[in-house]
Amino acid sequence: MHRLLIVGGGAGGLELATRLGDAFGASKTRQRMAITLIDRNPTHMWKPLLHEVAAGSIDPFTHQLEYAAQAHWHGFEFEQGDLVGIDRINQQVIVGALCDEHGEHILPARTLPYDTLVLAVGSTTHYFDVKGAAEHSLALDTVPQAERFRRRLIAAAMRAGHSDRHCGTRTPGASGASGASGASGTHGTRKPRVNIAIVGGGATGVELAAELRSATDALAAYGLHKLDPLRDIRIVLIDSGPRILPALTERVSAAALEVLRKRGIDVRVDERITEVTRDALHTASGEAIPADLTVWAAGIRAPAVMARLGLPVNALGQVLVRPTLQTDDEHIFAIGDCAACPLPNGSRNVPPRAQAAHQQASFLVKAMKCRLDGTALPAFHYRDLGSLVSLGHTSAVGSLMGGLAGDSLFLGGIVARVMYKSLYRMHVAALHGWKRMVLNTIAHRLRRATVPRVKLH
């Protein structure tokens, strides 16, 4: 019996465990592989949805998947706990003790043997050693972090609305420098009551900014605050580069910028943050940008544990892998955001996207069959299918690779939004099959007809 351990239940790790369990696991009459998935959390959430959780657009508990249930349905085992280390000589993974919210031990520290180990632990927020960034800003790496931001957003809006109603007056003044956005007219001459700052103009930052504008409108419609969403709640998106969405084409970047500005979002580019304090962001140009809530989405790096495993890593802590996705140890593979997988031309690595993790999981399904059969492993080839960025409930922008001329095909508006939503449905189908995905979609549609547009508590 070949013992396979998969550490990390993200998009790549969970899809891999599910597909291998269906093909070779305990659900089969002739089991060829004992598959165990290890994750620190008991449930899975598709990470690209976290900006919607932060804005309250979706209830995370209706979109989470329990690892233990998925393991039961698809012929693999689940172990909950943190990755602590690897004993490469004895081929064992060290899993930390599991404790409850009060610090009481639920499970002790354990060692699990393996014949093949797959590292799929994802990524964490990269603060780039900016002073105060980790202490005074919020990240969106996990559901609890996204929920924490949502609760703080509602509290800030309610507090400002209550104060405004009882003060009866406003203090005129500048609404903050408009910077590159030229959005000073959006706020008029009065200062915003709530300032939300998002550092990082990548996909996460752009999607969160657009979703928050829709959320603040909804919160006002439900009466949670009496603020004017455009004039009283300021959203500023800041990036140190010359444009937002630098990983995508200039046309996609320009289209997203136009939509954000039309929605009253202050977009700053070529603005480097040097310090984050409790109520402001300080820039290299000497400006202090007011911020009641700060989200840091400026970059990612591999979890710190990766640098302690004895495997070669790059400056971002990602494990270096060969074209077969093996590390310098032939028994250990790495996929997803925690892996530095070079593209064929060697100029850069496979980008940290959900589609890359999905493709690598599909590749390893075939590679594991080769390991069972004792044949040579193939090489992984990444295929860029394009990227889509959500800009709220009714819009998205992006590009698909392979247009009529062999280049990228630009998409925008409702068509792009429908395709963006389909990416999550494809992930659900990979975990549950197409029939259950359809039922899951119908169930969510019916539920949305009976709940508020945003989560209100």
Image (cartoon, helix red, strand yellow):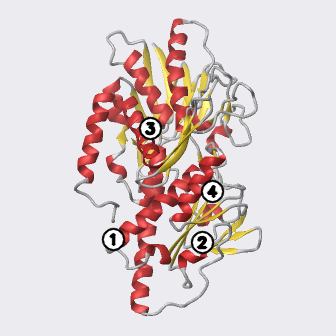
Q: Nearer the viewer, mark 1 or mark 4?
A: 1
Which residue is at 44% across, 23% downward? Answer: 35
Q: Amino acid at mark 1?
A: Ala
Q: Secondary structure at mark 1?
A: helix
Q: Amino acid at mark 2?
A: Ala
Q: Nearer the viewer, mark 4 or mark 3?
A: 3
> In the image, 113: left or right of 270?
left
**Cβ–Cβ below 8 Å for labels 3 and 2?**
no
Instruction: In the rendered view, tell whether residue 359 sits above or below residue 141.
Output: above
> Quick one: label 4, few (<14), some, or many (20+) residues within 10 Å?
many
* Residue 200, numbered label: 4
Residue 397: percent from the left, percent from the top? 52, 47
Q: Nearer the viewer, mark 3 or mark 2?
A: 2
- Between marks 2 and 4, how big is the CA–CA gap? 19 Å
Q: Secondary structure at mark 3?
A: helix
Which residue is at 55% across, 52% downward? Answer: 204
Given residues 350 and 374, the one toward you in this image is 350
Q: Secondary structure at mark 4?
A: loop
Of callouts 1 and 4, the N-terminal one: 4
Q: Amino acid at mark 3?
A: Leu
Residue picked out by circle 1: 221
Tell which residue pokes out farthest to the top in this image: 374
> Quick one: label 2, few (<14), some, or many (20+) residues within 10 Å?
many
Residue picked out by circle 3: 423
